[in-house]
Image (cartoon, rainbow, N blue to C red):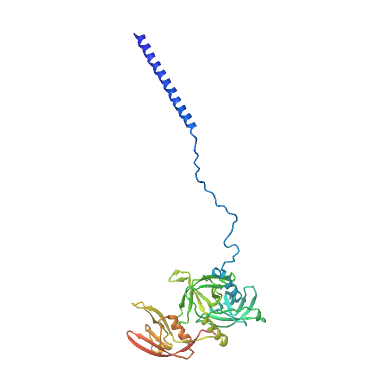
């Protein structure tokens, strides 16, 4: 019985093996037949787009020759070249106790006979002066005079051949506008003549001078020690001011972009007086104004400083008076008030109308004169 069961099991396994073999052969033939059928079908190749660089016969540049380039529109080289020979380095030497102090700054040759405008604080109390041109030529110079109120001074080059000098060619005294591009030329940090660019930021500025003989051009041109006394020019190379002041700190904070220049209209007036008399005199009212704005956003001026020994105080003007008019003209700008007084002849009388706490008052003020000379 046991032998029979063993024989039956063997036959069953044999049958399963034969069936498995037939299945494998069948599957193999099916796959082989499918490959044969696919081989009979022609293959189709799909051409995908391929990126190709555009063909260029010749490489060119739009600014290859500069024929269509407006150089004046993007460059100030012509303006700088025009003024550069007229801007000089100023060197002053003074004896301070037992030490010799050397001061450097800048200046502008204003006349063919060698008069140079610079800053009062550049020449200071020095007695020995030298002028260096942009080409390196060195001249001795002497002090003609200086004015502390406008921080201007005049030197004269000492030479036997003034024909070799290059005075400033064109001077612009009017029409300067906020936003104009300007260039400063000078001797920053005694590096030699340098040019920096900016814009006019404001007009008619006054700084810390209580007398009020400041009608300055404010710029954001980069100025450093040594630029003082140098030229401020417009984009065409016209002289519009003498750089005079750099503000680096205010209200305990570091500030930048605050430079000031004396307008050429004022600088020429002071220079001519110094050349003629050795000093400059200014019509003096003895009052300073500050710009204010009312609730309707209207500007007006208030007397913010008054000299107790000055003509305005003696005539009856007081601190806090609201300015209405000067010689019959409505005034609401600080520089307008300054300009109208400074343009009057020495000894003139002005009529100042003010409003004092709702009361209208009028004063006749005989202007005195004040000198900025330290001689």
Q: Quadrant of the C terminus?
A: bottom right
Query: Which residue is at a point 61% across and 77% down the rendered structure image?
Result: 131
The x, y position of residue 165, in whole percent, is: 63, 78
Q: Nearer the viewer, residue 47 or 251?
A: 47
Q: Examine the rendering and report whether any part of residue 89 can be seen.
A: no
**Residue 11 to residue 375: above or below:** above
**Residue 319 to residue 256: above or below:** below
Q: Nearer the viewer, residue 184 or 151?
A: 184
Q: Nearer the viewer, residue 82 or 244?
A: 82
Q: Examine the rendering and report whether any part of residue 140 can be seen.
A: yes
Query: Which residue is at a point 56% across and 70% down the rendered structure image?
Result: 72
**Residue 18 to residue 119: above or below:** above
Q: Nearer the viewer, residue 71 or 343?
A: 71
**Residue 287 to residue 48: above or below:** below
Q: Quadrant of the N terminus?
A: top left
The x, y position of residue 241, in whole percent, is: 53, 77
The x, y position of residue 91, in whole percent, is: 59, 75
Query: Which residue is at a point 48% across and 78% down the rendered structure image?
Result: 216
- Numbered marks: total: 0
Outermost residue on the right side: it is 160
């Amino acid at each position: 019985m046991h032998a029979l069961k063993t024989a039956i099991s063997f036959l069953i396994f044999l049958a399963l093996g034969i069936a498995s073999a037939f299945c494998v052969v069948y599957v193999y033939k099916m796959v082989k037949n499918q490959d044969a059928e696919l081989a009979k079908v022609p293959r189709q190749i799909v051409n995908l787009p391929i990126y190709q660089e555009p063909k260029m016969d010749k490489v060119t540049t739009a600014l290859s020759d500069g024929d269509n380039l407006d150089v004046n529109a993007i460059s100030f080289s012509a303006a700088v070249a025009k003024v550069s020979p007229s801007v000089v380095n100023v060197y002053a030497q003074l004896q301070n106790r037992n030490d010799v102090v050397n001061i450097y700054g800048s200046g502008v040759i204003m006349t063919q006979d060698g008069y140079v405008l610079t800053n009062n604080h550049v020449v200071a109390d020095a007695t020995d002066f030298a002028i260096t041109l942009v080409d390196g030529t060195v001249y001795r110079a002497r002090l003609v005079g200086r004015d502390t109120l406008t921080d201007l001074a005049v030197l004269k080059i000492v030479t036997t051949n003034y024909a070799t000098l290059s005075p400033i060619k064109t001077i612009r005294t009017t029409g300067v506008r906020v936003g104009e591009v300007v260039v400063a030329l000078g001797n920053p940090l005694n590096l030699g003549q340098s040019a920096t660019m900016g814009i006019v930021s404001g007009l008619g500025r006054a700084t810390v001078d209580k007398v009020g003989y400041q009608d300055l051009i404010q710029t954001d041109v980069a100025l450093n020690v040594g630029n003082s006394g140098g030229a401020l020019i417009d984009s065409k190379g016209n002289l519009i001011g003498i750089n005079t002041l750099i503000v680096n700190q205010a209200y305990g904070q570091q500030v930048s972009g605050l430079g000031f220049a004396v307008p050429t209209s004022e600088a020429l007036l002071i220079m001519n007086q110094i050349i003629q008399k050795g000093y400059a005199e200014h019509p003096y009212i003895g009052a300073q104004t500050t710009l204010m704005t009312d609730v309707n956003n209207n500007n007006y001026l208030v007397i913010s400083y008054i000299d107790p020994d000055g003509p305005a105080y003696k005539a009856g003007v007081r601190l806090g008076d609201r300015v209405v008019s000067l010689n019959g003209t409505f005034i609401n700008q600080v520089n307008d008030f300054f300009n109208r007084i400074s343009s009057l002849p020495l000894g003139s009388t002005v009529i100042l109308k003010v409003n004092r706490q709702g009361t209208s008052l009028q004063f006749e003020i005989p202007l005195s004169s004040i000198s900025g000379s330290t001689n």
